[in-house]
Image (tube, rainbow, N blue to C red):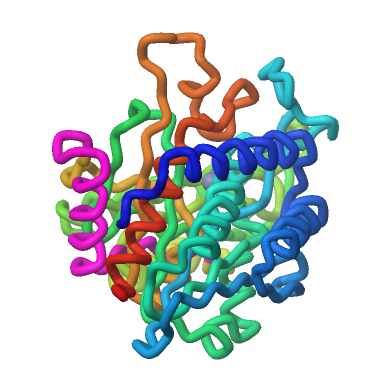
């Protein structure tokens, strides 16, 4: 990008840092991000940037045209806005004022980055085309990106490519991880019920014991990862709840319920796992004369970077931060991200920006995402604003 006058970028960073702290003081969870939405709208109005509210309740789309628009090209950047149900324990000056809610994933930072990018691009307009900024609610399980897409986001704003970042306390500040292919897993929920026949624990022959049958199912599910899926395909199947019985020691219950999660990076593997679980539940319950139900509740898509877009973003990041700062070979995370839904529709790139401070072990920037002592590192603000602005100027050259 045309290297901005450093005072100009510093002024923007100072302004959006105030926004970041303001957002941090006023966190809200899925679809309740009214404070954030109002703040974004106020800032965009102040800067004379056009925007549209009401996407997935609290979401906003801002639009900035370049000095020229003859290319007809459009790109999108996404930032999430929601917080978590956590009691904050940072002791920060800008700590949450809302008991039990906290920005513990740094989405206050992501929103502020997008605001800073908006201001930078609106004032420089060194590009030929149009940029849309997607301020998205409900990333933490509420599927805000999915809802915006269902409401017609890409019909109204047909971008050619889309970009996002996440801060990463597990990498030091300055390091950026970018690669093509899978970076975050899909996440689906499974619910299995085994319906047997209850009765007296002293007369098991008169019952169909759902606990024994469900235990067999839990064990058999482990063979999917080890014996059905290729060893090179990363998969997690975890049963996280096993509920049966009333607490009594002398009653065999009528049913048992299992709840768990399935994570993969590949939709074909995902389908195989779904069919295999259904088969295991049906055959094991049948073998014991019980009945079984199985529900596969589809969650987030895997987050898969387009290879060409990832290569482009790697090159841009190397130019800005130096070649040795960019990691291109790292294991994908089994965590999930609903930006995957946008990448399923449009080519793009999700980059991971380190924010850790290894020299200060007690720093809030080292605590893991979703930890009550975690805090977003404001030093990422200028870095990601430069990164997003450079993508714009490279993909939409004047
Ligand atoms: Zn999170
Ligand atoms: Zn997050």
Where residue 300 sits in the image (x, y, percent)? 50, 63
**Residue 134 position in % (x across, y down):** 57, 67
Residue 348 spot, x, y in % from top left: 34, 68
| Residue at x 42%, y 74% (from the top left corner) | 75
Camera-side residue: 76 or 287? 76
Quarter that holds the C terminus: bottom left
Would you say residue 301 sits in the magenta stretch?
yes
Is residue 209 visible in this depiction of the protein? no
Taking depth in this image into account, of 48 and 376 the one nearest to the observer is 48
In the rendered view, would you say 85 is above or below 274?
above
Q: Vertical placement of 208 versus 127: above or below?
A: above
In magenta segment, residue 43: no
Secondary structure mainly formed by the magenta segment: helix
Q: Is residue 51 visible?
A: yes
Quadrant placement of the N terminus: bottom left
* Region rendered in magenta: 299-325
| x and y, in percent, of residue 354 in the image | 37, 34
- The quarter of the rendering in which ligand 1 is drawn is top right
Q: Nearer the viewer, residue 89 or 230?
A: 89
| Residue at 40% across, 41% down | 383
Q: Quadrant of residue 262?
A: bottom left
Task: Report how many numbered discs are placed on residues in the image.
Answer: 0
Q: Say above or below: 98 vs 16.
A: above
Residue at x 33% of width, y 57% of height: 390
User: Which quadrant of the view contains residue 249?
Assistant: top right
Seen at 77% across and 47% down, the residue is 28
């Amino acid at each position: 990008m045309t290297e901005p006058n450093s005072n100009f970028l510093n002024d923007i960073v100072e302004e959006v840092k105030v926004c970041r702290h303001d957002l941090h003081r006023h966190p809200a969870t899925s679809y309740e991000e009214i404070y954030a939405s109002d703040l974004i709208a106020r800032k965009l109005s102040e800067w004379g940037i056009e925007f549209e509210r009401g996407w997935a309740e609290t979401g906003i789309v801002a639009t900035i045209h370049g000095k020229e628009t003859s290319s007809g090209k459009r790109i999108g950047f996404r930032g999430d806005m929601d917080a978590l149900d956590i009691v904050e324990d940072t002791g920060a000056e800008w700590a949450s004022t809302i008991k039990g809610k906290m920005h513990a994933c740094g989405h206050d930072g992501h929103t502020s980055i997008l605001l800073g990018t908006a201001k930078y691009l609106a004032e420089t307009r060194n590009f030929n085309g149009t940029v849309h900024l997607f301020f998205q609610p409900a990333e933490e399980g509420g599927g805000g990106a999915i809802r915006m897409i269902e409401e017609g986001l890409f019909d109204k704003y047909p971008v050619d490519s889309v970009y996002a970042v996440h801060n990463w306390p597990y990498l030091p500040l300055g390091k950026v991880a970018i690669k093509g292919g899978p970076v975050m897993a899909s996440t689906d929920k499974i619910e299995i019920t085994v319906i047997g026949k209850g009765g007296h624990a002293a007369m098991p022959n008169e019952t169909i014991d759902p606990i024994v049958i469900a235990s067999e199912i839990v064990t058999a599910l482990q063979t999917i990862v080890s014996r059905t899926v290729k060893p090179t395909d990363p998969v997690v199947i975890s049963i996280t709840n096993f509920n049966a019985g009333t607490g009594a020691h002398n009653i065999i219950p009528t049913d048992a319920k299992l709840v768990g999660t399935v994570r993969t990076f590949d939709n074909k593997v995902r389908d195989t796992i779904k069919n295999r679980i259904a088969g295991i539940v049906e055959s094991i319950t049948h073998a014991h004369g019980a009945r079984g139900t199985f529900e596969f509740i589809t969650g987030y898509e895997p987050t898969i970077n387009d290879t060409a877009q990832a290569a482009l973003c790697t090159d841009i990041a190397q130019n800005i931060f130096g070649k040795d700062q960019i990691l291109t070979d790292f294991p994908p995370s089994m965590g999930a991200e609903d930006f995957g839904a946008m990448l399923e529709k449009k080519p793009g790139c999700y980059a991971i920006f380190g924010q850790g401070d290894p020299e200060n072990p007690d720093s809030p920037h080292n605590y893991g995402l979703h930890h009550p002592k975690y805090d977003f590192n404001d030093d990422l603000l200028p870095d990601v604003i430069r990164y997003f602005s450079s993508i714009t100027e490279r993909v939409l050259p004047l």
